[in-house]
Image (cartoon, rainbow, N blue to C red):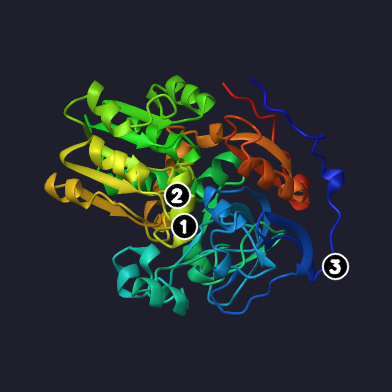
Amino acid sequence: MAAVLPSPITSTDYVPHPTNKMKAARWMGRRDVEIGLVPKPTITDPSDAIIQVTHCTISGSDLHIYEGDLSEAVRKGDIMGREAIGLVEQVGPNVKTLEVGDRVIILPVIACGHCDYCKRKEYSLCDVSNPSKEMQIAYGHRVAGILGHSQLCGGYPGNQAEFCRVPNADLTCLKAPHDVDARKLLSLSDVVSTAWHALELAEVRDGDVVGVWGCGPIGLSIQRLAKLRGASMVYAVDRDPQRLQRAEAFGMIPIDVSVHPDMGEYLLSIRPQGVDKAIEASGYRSTQQPSLAAMRAFGLGRESSDPVSAVIKATRKGGNIALVGDFFFTTHDFPIGPLVQKALTVRGGQSIPQRYQPFLLDLVISGRLDPSWMFTYEDHFENIADHYRRFAEHEEPGGLKVVLVTAFGRSQQPISDITID
């Protein structure tokens, strides 16, 4: 079916702003994102690059901020966004791999490249790029800084804007060909690398039976990449009928949570030995239980243990579990007994996009991987506030991600009409 598109995008839409100003999506409070005119970023460190954004999108992580779940760690006026591509406008004197005019994918994780973690290519655990004292106190350690996330992750301005300052640009920008579809490149900024990271955490191998909780862009990407890695069977768990239909069309076995609320028990009823590898990719939005609101009100836990409990129950003894849905806080009634007694291995963490690139980009360029399917809508960047609302309220059933094109992007290379097979 063809996606519903707004008015045609033409090069005549591009009207430059004063050189020191730009449009940016700013968090103004719970469920309140607005486009504002703010100072254009400048190079503040010799390793910086300034990227003129052509395309960006909204991620599930952005919804944490939009919905106010991280309101104590976000400041009014903070610039949103962690997924974007664009052209290099300026580079600092220490940038070695980029030149003005290069097309780049902006990776969300900021890494120094020199600490012990970065030397082990564990870039999302960088010791240097995140100055947050709050995370140090809450977690005992700081993990890497992330563009457009929160003060917990360094407070870096995001890339839902006409320009973005990218720290340590040699490691945070990935040079990409000018002739590759923007949708394919945009998907590589976060979604595809997170999906691959999930499969690495779960150690999915040839012949494995895999269960994936979540059929959003990341969940569906995990499912498709699991097949590419040789998984023999993939169960796709969700409650959205259109997303489940999409998973089935991709060759997965769909399971509807709304029909089978005890998902762990149901999966064992159809596969008594359990799945070999299980991946949780739905996060905090996977449950609507009234009990969670009550627990949050009384301070007993701010995350739901329901999806993780089902994952633990459905995984075979000695199996592997990966958690890549965003979890930041505490949870209640976590099934530690089954986790320990079944000898399960559980791993989680932010994606490590620098580790998986340019391997994933090469898959796209060679034609072995086409992730453009995840973009089901296209619109002008200036309408981003409306798309936040639509995304949060599930206004478009089964809708996945929107391509948001800046005025500069519209002047460069209009995207062709998006169709869904």
The correct choice, above or below, for 182 with respect to 160 in the image is: above
Tell me which amino acid carries mark 1. Answer: Arg
Q: What is the three-letter code of the residue carrying label 2?
A: Leu
- Report which residue position mark 1 lands on: 296
Circle 1 packing at 10 Å, graded few (<14), some (14-19), many (20+), is some
Q: Nearer the viewer, residue 87 or 386?
A: 386
Q: Residue at x 33, y 41 (%)?
A: 279
Left or right, 283 with reference to 392: left
Residue 4 quadrant:
top right
Return the mark for residue 292: 2
If you read the primary sequence from the N terminus, does the residue marked by circle 1 or circle 3 appear first? 3
Viewer-proximal residue among 331 and 345: 331
From mark 3 to mark 2, how far is it between C-alphas? 48 Å
Q: Position of residue 417 (x, y in %)?
A: 70, 29
Identify the secondary structure beneath mark 3: loop
Q: Nearer the viewer, mark 3 or mark 2?
A: 2
> Which residue matches tag 3?
18
Labels 1 and 2 touching (C-beta < 8 A): yes
Q: Amino acid at mark 3?
A: Pro
Asked which secondary structure carries label 1, the reply is helix
Q: Is residue 355 above or below residue 238?
A: below
Q: CA distance from mark 1 to mark 3?
A: 46 Å
User: Dot 2 lies on which element?
Assistant: helix
Lateral position of residue 315 relative to residue 75, left or right: left
Instruction: Tell which tag, 1 or 3, sits nearer the viewer.
Output: 1
Query: Looking at the image, which residue is at 45% across and 79% down?
Result: 133
Q: Position of residue 281 (x, y in %)?
A: 41, 43
